[in-house]
Image (cartoon, helix red, strand yellow):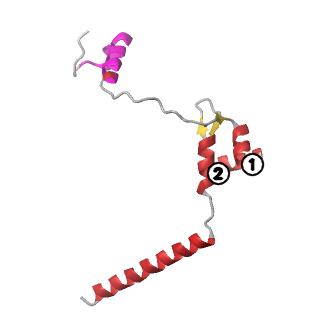
Amino acid sequence: MSINKNTRLIDLTVADLMVVIKDCMTGFIQVDPIVIEDDEIGGYEIAETVTGYSRQTLYQLKSAGKLPHVALPGGGIRFSKKMLINWLLSHQKLTNQEIQEKAETLKLKRKLRRKYCLLRLFR
């Protein structure tokens, strides 16, 4: 069958659709599959091991949308060890020295902003 711009989708057979899909896929750049080293994917057991939280706490965090997870089409939940570690590290607290450095940076920015505003007022 000759497929062109005016061909209706309903007129195509499965074989025609497979040809179209194969033609479309050959134009794409082939990308190597993503290799995730030292990553485990599993259920709540992995999340309990990585985070140290109880299963009840994990249920609450997942329900609140605070815990990174993968929802499977059948309704299951899976966790990635790397995602959980990154999530834990994102909640890392700053040291006193880091807080002091941030405060100094903010003070400098505030001074520059005020100076800039004053310069604009007197122009």
Pointer 1 residue? 52
Residue toward you, 8 or 3: 3
Pointer 2 residue? 64
At label 2, the amino acid type is Ala
Residue toward you, 116 or 75: 116
Image coordinates of residue 76 in percent, x first then y, are 65, 33
* Magenta stretch: helix, strand or loop mostly: helix
* Residue at (62% x, 68% y) in the render: 95
**Left or right, residue 47 beside residue 17:** right
Q: Is residue 83 magenta?
A: no
**Left or right, residue 3 beside residue 85:** left
User: From what the image shows, is residue 85 above or below residue 41?
Assistant: below
Range covered by the magenta-colored residues: 7-25
Instruction: Name the secondary structure under disc 2.
Output: loop
Q: Quadrant of residue 91?
A: bottom right
* Residue at (50% x, 78% y) in the render: 104
At label 1, the amino acid type is Gly
Q: Is residue 16 magenta?
A: yes
User: From what the image shows, is residue 90 above or below residue 30?
Assistant: below
Image coordinates of residue 63 in percent, x first then y, are 66, 47
* Residue at (29% x, 88% y) in the render: 121
Image coordinates of residue 23 in percent, x first then y, are 30, 19
User: From what the image shows, is residue 40 above or below residue 84?
Assistant: above
Q: Quadrant of residue 110?
A: bottom left
Q: CA separation, marks 2 and 1? A: 18 Å
Upstream in the sequence, badge 2 or badge 1?
1
Instruction: Name the secondary structure under disc 1.
Output: loop
Disc 2 packing (10 Å; few <14; some 14–19; many ≥20): few
